[in-house]
Amino acid sequence: MKAILSFLAAMFIVGAVEAQVVKDQVVKADIESAVVYLTAAELTHTANLNLAEGAVRLRFTDISEKLNPQSIRVITNEEIDILSITSKVNYLTKNAELPRIKQLKDSLRVVSEQIQDLSDLKNAFATEKQLLIQNQKLGGENTGVTVAELKAASEFYRTRIAEINKEATKIDRNTAKLALTTERLNNELNELNAENLYARAEIEIVISAPRAIKTDLTLKYIVNSCGWSPSYDLKAVDTDKPVELTYQGRVFNNTGVDWKDIKVMLSTADPTRSVTKPKMNPWYLTQYSYANVYRGVSKGEGYTQNMYTGTLNGGTDFGNAVYDTDEEERTTNPGSDLGIVTDYAETAVPELSAEFDIVKRMTVPADDKPYPVDIAIHSLPATYKHYAVTKLDKDVFLLARIAGWQDLNMVDGPVNVYYSGTYLGQSFISTRDVKDTLDMSLGRDAKVLVTRTKLKEFSSTKIIGTKRRETMTYELVAKNNRKSDVEIDILDQIPISQTEEIKVKVLDITEVTPDAVTGEVLWNAKLKPGETKKYRISFQIEYPKDQQIEIIQNKQQSVRYKF
């Protein structure tokens, strides 16, 4: 009964408001702050209001049409009753063009008119030339012309047609130059997102004041087509010093409304989260496949990971790993490049949402371009280790093992790596790949050497009956030319037979035993300054002599043969 009475009372109040005249008031309140999520943002406006007693309809204009109507929230004095909140898109209003866009469009119009003028002039010359050609007959049917008249006429036609042809050529050249100017202007307009002129939304809030009152009203809502993506700078100076990790965000805005001098907070939370209490699902552990986890790799393009960030294919990868965004294939590649930012993709974020207050106020134009902002700079302890797979690469790679990264609320993203003031390339931090330490390659270290030499006196090829026996022996020599101790993992391998006809026998391996499944051989060496250590690996392969077995592994590279 009480609930029914409350409902009837509420209906009476609404009816009473509708019965009275509701005054309209346009509110001009710029965006004051933004909580920027990875793929959306919550914008905040604050209005200072002088209200008379009774109902008033507040109309907030110049709102992005990317507004999520269900997200609108209003905060005001508790004496104020909020009677209704509605929103609509006004398609008759569009955001004004930026001065630079207007200037470019004016220039484009002038160039277009010049091209048309040249085209008209060329058509006029073409018409004149056609008339000259059609009227070359001299004299009548029974009347001849003198030699002087013929000479004068010929000279006239030749001179005039030559002038026309010359003018036509000049027109073509000028038209080509103007066409290039048109192309450049259009490219510049595309860069400025010039055609992206969005309509404007409006939010209407009907409120009722019990008396004349001066109060503040805060309007919050979620907009899409904006967000931020993480990036990092990793700087290492030397192997006895910590690393500096700069955590950065790149804020982008494609809402159609510029954010001018606003307070910004970056968040890893999900703005679409429900108000219902959370419920945990079973936590199943399984392997996952590598996929594109970065906002920005164009479909069909790959990106190069120029760093060592984990164990791939059950073994250790060195150098550069290229991930194809369509087929997720992995190969080695000596390049160093990252795809252009054009797309969205799933990425890993911490389970407990993190928020980062940006100290300086930001201006983010609605041009969908990334605007960088520093989140934090951390000095992290690191240990350094070297890796060598001399069978595949003659150089030794330096790896920084970084501790303490778990407390930084990091999100998967690209990282620019520097060592001793030199830019090494761009990698990708995938937080799901690492446990206690974050491993990042610092490139090649010329001060630590590992050579791999085939010992001919202990290598041979023999025919024994129907079998061919290949014996291979290699010596690996590691040397530390640094002034401090180094630790280095040296990897090699024994071939694995996949048929009964091929037999592999290990003859000699210094100190260690190869992995029975992968054939991987791993030596861990600790070298003092100037110290050298030697390792040997020897094995025998026996197979039918009439079969072709790829004993020597070759790399695939492009070669130009036609010139």
Image (cartoon, rainbow, N blue to C red):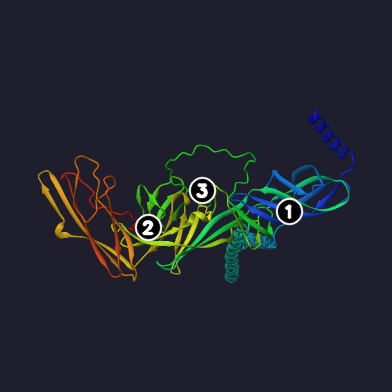
The residue sitting at 12% across, 51% down in the picture is 462
Q: Residue 319 carries which label?
A: 2
Circles 2 and 1: CB distance less than 8 Å?
A: no
Earlier in the chain: of badge 3 and badge 2, it is: 2
Of circles 2 and 1, the one toward us is 1
| Label 1 environment density (alpha carbons within 10 Å; few <14, some 14–19, many ≥20) | some
Q: Is residue 261 above or below residue 462?
A: below
504 horizontally vs 405: left or right? left
36 horizontally vs 469: left or right? right
Q: Residue 348 carries which label?
A: 3
Q: What residue type is labelled 1?
A: His
Residue ranking furthest to the front: 2
**Element class at badge 2:** loop
Q: Is residue 149 above or below residue 301?
A: below
404 horizontally vs 94: left or right? left
Q: Name the quarter where the C terminus is drawn.
A: bottom left
Q: Find disc 1 in the rendering and name its residue.
A: 45
Query: x and y percent of residue 306 in the render?
Result: 42, 58
